[in-house]
Image (tube, rainbow, N blue to C red):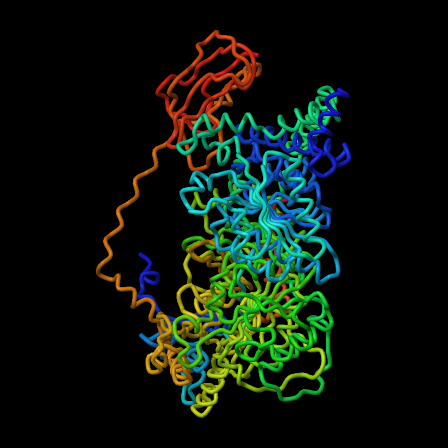
Amino acid sequence: MAMSAARARDDFKGAPNLPDPKILLDLFERMVLLRRFESIAQIACRKGETPGFLHLYIGEEATGVGVCAHLRPTDWVTSTHRGHGHALAKGANPGRVMAELFGKVDGICGGRGGTMHLYDRSVGLFGTNGIVAAGIGHAVGIGMGARQQGRDDIGVAFFGDGAANHGGFHEALNFAAVQRAPAVFICENNLYATATPLKSITLNPEIATKAASYGMPGVAVDGNDVFAVWLAMKEAAERARSGKGPTLIEAKTYRTVGHHEGDPVIGTYRTQEELDAWIKRDPIDMFRKRLIEDYGIADAEALAAIEARIEKVVEEALTFARNSPEPDPATVLLHVFADPINPPAALAWRAVGETRTQGWLEAVRDGIAEEMRANPAILYFGEGTGERGGSFAHTKNLWQEFGAERMVDTPISEQGFTAAAVGASATGARTVSDLMFADFAFETAGQIFLQAAKLRYMTSGLMSAPMVVRVGAGALRSSGPHHSGIYHPVFAHMPGLIVCVPSTPADAKGLMKTALRAGDPVIMLEPKALFASKGEVPVGEHFVPFGVARIARAGTDITIVAAGQMVQRTLEAAEALAAEGIEAEVIDPRTIMPLDIDTIVASVRKTHRLLIVDEAWAMCGLGGEIAQAINEFAFDELDAPPGRLHTAPTSHPFAPVLERAMLVDTARIAQGVRDVISGQPPVPDHWYTVGLKSAAPANPAPAPARSLPAASAAAAPSDDEPITMPFGDLTVSEGTVVKWLKTVGDQVKEGELIAEIETDKAVVEIEAPASGTLNAIDQPVGAVVPMGGRIGGIKK
Amino acid sequence: MNIATAQVRVAVSPYAHRLARERSLPLETLRGSGPGGRILAADVQGFVPVAAPLASPNAVAPAAALSPTAHRIAAFATAVALGALQDLLAALESSGHVFAIDDVLLRAAGRAFVEMPQAARFGGASVALELAGRQTVFAMIPEMALTSLRALRLAALADSRDETETPATLSLRLLPASDIRPMMTPLLPGRTMRLTVSSDTPGDHAECLLTTDAASVDEATAAAWLATLKSAIEQPLRLFV
């Protein structure tokens, strides 16, 4: 033993000094934890105990463990669909992670997140993630947010080789590099994006070399060598922490399981030889050997004792998960928004005081500046919104006051900097992601819809992303098809997003200030057509709460709901109608989500007629939504069918004459009111422009689904261990028994192959679930068996 | 068979429908000014009864044509929700105890007399159930159990006994289910109160019209009696214990 220790020191003469043996033993223990946890989870998944299917980290443990050994609980990691290992390496409680995989109430996300959405604020786990490359930019924002808050915590992103060809990777790395973001990027290159070989989808499979494109160091390491990973990460973490900027580490590794549980280990894309070669390089076995033989800091017995201890930990985790209750279905509606949805400042009573006349852009700039003065953790990301003051001069003078660190000029990388805004806003900073035009929001739709809006719900309210997405929205004089949309119904469709469409400078400022104190992501759609407008704005602190409509004009004969630039058009129409003896009441909801339906209902109870005027399109839109709400809440109050006026169902044409033909104007609103009052409301064009009336063939009735034989596991006697068709792949419902390798009466050992079942995707090898005697073959060769169905039994 | 329900559908705005209901105006009497003759709120609000007998300054005969007691008749109407009762009857039926709404109405009328004894000052707390061309009287003193009431009612249906001359304060008339609201029904000879009940076709609600002889029953008492009946039917559990 002493001999081998001496030899180890000799071997390492050229390398940095070996760290404290405790560190090396911790690395070993952590890897064992990750491996044993996944093995237990694998069995639970096959038994159908986990509701979804799992992507296991088996074979890649050295990377997650080597990286996370350098991280504090206040550093954050972002992760991938294959992220249980990252969660555990970062310190998440194994029992609570397992309970989350089971969808139980004691899971780290209360059962709302599950395997691919594991978050834990207490240990700095920023989510495993169901979306490839989505977490990379989060790590950039996490680091920048920590820096802005005066901490030297860092953001670390794990992602796979598949993500390295995704825009999210390139945008995030470029943005991080130019910002010297305190971040480290860890590419776990396991050679396959699901089943697609890396070398078949890029001509440069050396991912570490891509760092050069962004002017940052790129390092490739053996991802199965935990100490090599540890050494590479040591330097990268120090570099990030000390303000020198990010590093890309490519860890070359391999998963020795299928893409997900239920997927074949080799499949059609790998060879047995390749798998065997990597199994020989198993990270735990290699490190065990080195600890004993090369470093001489432990013997086999000591390591076996560690493994025995971990075995107990994972067994306890499994028991904990099994015993944890299901979440209460009555809680399903909780954690979509903060409760209350408005920050205290927006609800505080303020005397209506002095006002002054201000332009829209100036008023909103003032609001942002006031909030940035009050909260030094606000960062503003935008394209040209720094020194140049924004394309609409909408950030003029903010860069001069708050500096380049806070008024961050970004590359045209909506996805990259919006992801950073999500990461920063969820970890203590606040961010504005200025996307210039509402149309551009779709360049980063995934970050807005799938990451920011869902964060609170996925974490059962433990985390949220209170960022503001700021865009100029709506039609303005031939802005054309890519710069004219407003899209608020699209955003309002998404649970968890607050959607603002102000119509006056005062409301725009007040809503912006509320948004910068809110608990949830807010999309602020400022109508470009109103940028040149002026209005009275209260002097001093001025907040407008979400979900409180403004009665822009009182009237008795009809209620008109209009938001944004439609409010002014509607008020003009109302004046014209007053001359005809029609007094219209105009309701400006100000926020589309939450929508103040109570104010609209109260108005309809008074006027008994309703017209919705909206700049967005009619299909699945605000008009239909509000009209149906009136059916639900105030049907008996209607003296005429509700009407709706929307922008015509076309893209925005460039030619002014065409654009005028598509938009709702004052004359159309006035006529719409007359039509509703006459009992014959306008019908939007979208019913007539689809061109399907004659051409659509009649739909044939769908063939009834073939019924499957029922799973018969319940019939088994108690001392009989059922052999079942494993669960795992939710896209496969059944399989055919192709071979029994044993006959009734044979002795079998646990884990021994006993049968093969062929599904649409692969041949699944069935292992003996226990040692004993095969005492029943319930499903002969050729039988079709449903997932989870019993095929035989073993007498223990 | 029922011509009223086979009529052509009348188009009416939801708000106008509500206003007409509140004013007890039959929609058939209204002329619609909306598209396709749809009745609008303004049509209800502007409705002037045509040829109303008392509105005509020259009418002398109509007053004489009224029954001698018409001028002292008071009428009270209410809508009673039957949901809770239907649920309870269904639950009882599933345990083998069958009751009809008729039984419950008799019982509820008895309960109302117990709680409002002054309503029964003339004639005692007996109720005459109006059958086809005859009446059968149930003595309600003190309160008869539902099972007994039902047995008596079924027996009365089976025989042809007429108790029109037997004293009773109230006569109870059940109209066949329809969506028609009773507006006015005359008192029957010898009865100071008459309750006419018509449930809607789904059986969710019943319209109850109480006509009383104002000289015999104080108007406030009659209204309170009807309120007691409504409450008893809407919270029916108390009638069964």
Q: Residue furthest top?
A: A745
Quadrant location of the N terminus of chain A?
top right
Check the image and name the residue furthest to the bottom: A579
Q: Classify the position of the C terminus of chain A by image quarter.
A: top right
**Whether residue A743 is situated above or below residue B215 in the rendered picture:** above
Q: Quadrant of residue A351?
A: bottom right
Q: Position of residue A667 (x, y in %)?
A: 39, 85
Given residues B235 and A569, the one toward you in this image is A569
- The answer to whether residue A595 is visible is no
A794 or A212, which is in the foreground?
A: A212
Q: How many marks?
A: 0
Q: Position of residue A174 (x, y in %)?
A: 55, 58
Above-or-below relation of A359 to A402: below
Residue at 70 percent across and 33 percent down: it is A12
> Looking at the picture, does residue A752 appear above or below residue B199?
above
Which is more toward the observer, A241 or A436?
A241
Q: Is residue B109 left or right of residue B12?
A: right
Q: Is residue A575 visible?
A: yes
Q: Position of residue A709 (x, y in %)?
A: 40, 27
